[in-house]
Image (spheres, coloured by chain):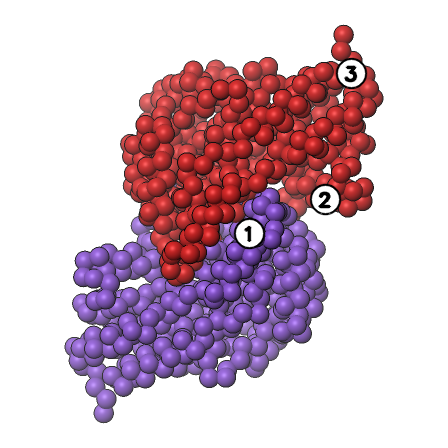
Chain colours: A purple, B red
Amino acid sequence: MISEKMLRLAQNNSVIRAMFEEGNALAERFGRENVFDFSLGNPNFPAPPSLDGAVRAVLDDTLSTDVHGYMSNAGFLPVRRAVSENLNARFGSGYEPAGIIMSVGAAGALNVVLKTLLNPGDEILAFAPYFVEYGNYVANYDGVLKVVPPNPPSFLPDEKAFAALISDKTKAVIINTPNNPTGVIYGEKTLTAIADVLTQKQKEYGHPIYLISDEPYRELVYDGAAQPFSANFYENTLVCYSWSKSLSLPGERIGYIAVRPGAEDYALLLDAMSIATRVMGFVNAPALMQLAVARVLSEEPAISGYAENRKLLFEGLTALGYECVRPDGAFYLWVQAPGSDDKAFVAAAKKYNILFVPGTSFACPGYVRIAYCVSRDMIERSLTAFAALASDLGLRKA
Amino acid sequence: MISEKMLRLAQNNSVIRAMFEEGNALAERFGRENVFDFSLGNPNFPAPPSLDGAVRAVLDDTLSTDVHGYMSNAGFLPVRRAVSENLNARFGSGYEPAGIIMSVGAAGALNVVLKTLLNPGDEILAFAPYFVEYGNYVANYDGVLKVVPPNPPSFLPDEKAFAALISDKTKAVIINTPNNPTGVIYGEKTLTAIADVLTQKQKEYGHPIYLISDEPYRELVYDGAAQPFSANFYENTLVCYSWSKSLSLPGERIGYIAVRPGAEDYALLLDAMSIATRVMGFVNAPALMQLAVARVLSEEPAISGYAENRKLLFEGLTALGYECVRPDGAFYLWVQAPGSDDKAFVAAAKKYNILFVPGTSFACPGYVRIAYCVSRDMIERSLTAFAALASDLGLRKA
């Protein structure tokens, strides 16, 4: 009696989430220390102490009804002001407080944006490999996800393939940089090229094509790499941000949508997004957490810890003969599957209680995603298991 | 370029939310003390100090990654266990922890339930007057909301009209008791009658018809009235609860769905609801707030304050000649519009900076909803304005 859409989803549940549950089951069976679960982007590093301090301070210095009560669906105005000023100071952007819609994480933000934009049959483009949930989000509003094929070995967008997929039905293009699952950063050149294609196509079709920039990993960059601010390259950019990764708050569901004042249909977009937030049942981003993050906007992520993990895992696996894409950002290692069979690779690893996600789940078979937002200790212990796996798979350095 | 659905919504935005924004604007213009805003169900009483204490205690005694990290989409298992045990202890129900899905408030819960159940064209029944958002929630999944006409003066369901509206396409019926906007409580007799109709219709059509019980006001009852537990009357009940009203936490978006073990398609329903929570972008109910409410499940709402407000407003308005339904629960007064013109009544009141919501917004013209979850002081000051309004409207007691 459940809906047909949901029945299909229940029958093909998220591989990543299924692994999360499986990892917990294995840990109960074999002991947490004997399971190497690299499946989920659940930050291992704690939220900064300043965040918990901000939660306490809000409770101390603000009236209970002002902390926990309703506010405008778009969020507390002082919070939206603080976010816009922080972005403007860091990136030289020109956001207004009204241009910020507080959201239930980036997943909530993306759903609000897609609900706002999509008529049934409208098209959204994404670049493979991409976060598997994009497909579900687009399907929620009966849109069609068009996938630009993967472009190894750089995994940067193939501009020609991208331009060729845009049609009159294209409402928006989703990018995600630093990228989940590849760890690749779209630099100035790439963002400029994307903007150029979109600007030309907007002209050609006579209507806006929005750039949805899903950027929860924005601050997670290594070795002095920098993530240019996507919205500075293209006026019709809708930034979807979350503090899930940067402040290790994935369970709190707190993020925002940022819309540039020059974006087409600016006022209508904001109005509709605020209404979408309400009618979809979010109502508003969690109140206490809005007020808390607004007090720690200059806080930085636990980069040094992730950088150590990245080095340890990348060098360890490379030495064992695995072919890895060197990640410039995010906290994922993108590894070629021996024999290009990612599902077989995942199955072989599971024998050693190593869990990671097949590239097929990101529309990019032949690779796997290994999330290194885990304890350094687990990575160290896992290397013995990875070595045994490498031996099984016949990987040997020359 | 925004979606046609959203464009229509933007053009017909929620009267209630528009009033909330208007109330704020009036307050800025005339001073907060000169505006009598009865438009929104935003509790005036603070959250219990124990709740803020629980937030602090969670931060003190739980690892940051365990507080703020991802958990299963359905919520923390110990929280779900605590909720199920609390319900079972209070109502003699037999919930399992797995039968509780933590949600982003009742609005999130209702959307997850409707997403899970509805194919396009499927029907949901609601009893007028009903919370206006039900229509939007059902439309999100291309369902059709069928409205059982209002049944004054009791405003209890008209069983015959109800039974007549059920068809083979009926997936579920939504009830809301204590009721927003009338304050009416569905007692044992009413809940039994609803269950009888549904049981018979399930048999007739050969498929389950779920009872969605939206009950954020469950504990808000007055003068010794009691709200029987809806799910005890009918096996296929899906309870949608929120702590928004009972603990004054509407901004925090924290609630749950409870499904009885005997409900048809129990395991599949739960699985699909968990997936719906994820793909709709909620991902999970806010983590810290899940852990906090689980520690204060025996906390009681600020009933005595609301009871005082209710008495003051009901007696004050009745003495001025207004015709009010005496509310047994929730925190709304349902008042007949003089001349049965609710919109004119709202407009006339606005001249005195009194804001309340026309019954038309609840599919029940001829009445208005006055929310008394406000300060006692505001109610007292408003009575002079209500008196002047009564005089304008020619209301005089015999």
Tags 1 and 2 touching, CB below 8 Å: no
Q: Secondary structure at mark 3?
A: loop
Tags 1 and 3 touching, CB below 8 Å: no
- In the rendered image, residue B141, in percent from the top left (x then y), is placed at 49, 42
* Residue B337, placed above or below residue B241: above
Q: Residue at x 37, y 23 (%)?
A: B233
Give the residue number, with chain letter if any, for mark 1: A59
Please identify the quadrant where the C terminus of chain B is shown: top right
Name the amino acid, label 3. Leu
- In the rendered image, residue B316, in percent from the top left (x then y), is placed at 70, 20
Give the residue number, with chain letter if any, for mark 3: B395
Q: Measure the alpha-carbon separation of dots 3 and 2.
A: 29 Å
What's the chain of the residue with tag 1? A
Q: Residue at x 46, y 61 (%)?
A: A249
Give the residue number, with chain letter if any, for mark 2: B24
Report whether mark 1 lies on the same chain as mark 2: no
Q: Measure the alpha-carbon separation of dots 1 and 3.
A: 46 Å
- In the rendered image, residue B322, in percent from the top left (x then y), is placed at 71, 18
- In the rendered image, residue A62, in percent from the top left (x then y), is placed at 61, 51
Q: Nearer the viewer, mark 1 or mark 3?
A: 1
Name the amino acid, label 1. Leu
What's the chain of the residue with tag 3? B
Q: Visible in this render: residue B237?
A: yes
What's the chain of the residue with tag 2? B
* Label 2 crowd bin: few (<14), some (14–19), many (20+), radius 10 Å: some
Please identify the quadrant where the N terminus of chain B is shown: bottom right
Report whether mark 3 lies on the same chain as mark 2: yes
In the rendered image, the residue lying farthest to the bottom is A398
Q: Secondary structure at mark 1?
A: helix
Q: Measure the alpha-carbon separation of dots 1 and 2.
A: 23 Å
Q: Residue at x 45, y 19 (%)?
A: B187
* Label 3 crowd bin: few (<14), some (14–19), many (20+), radius 10 Å: some
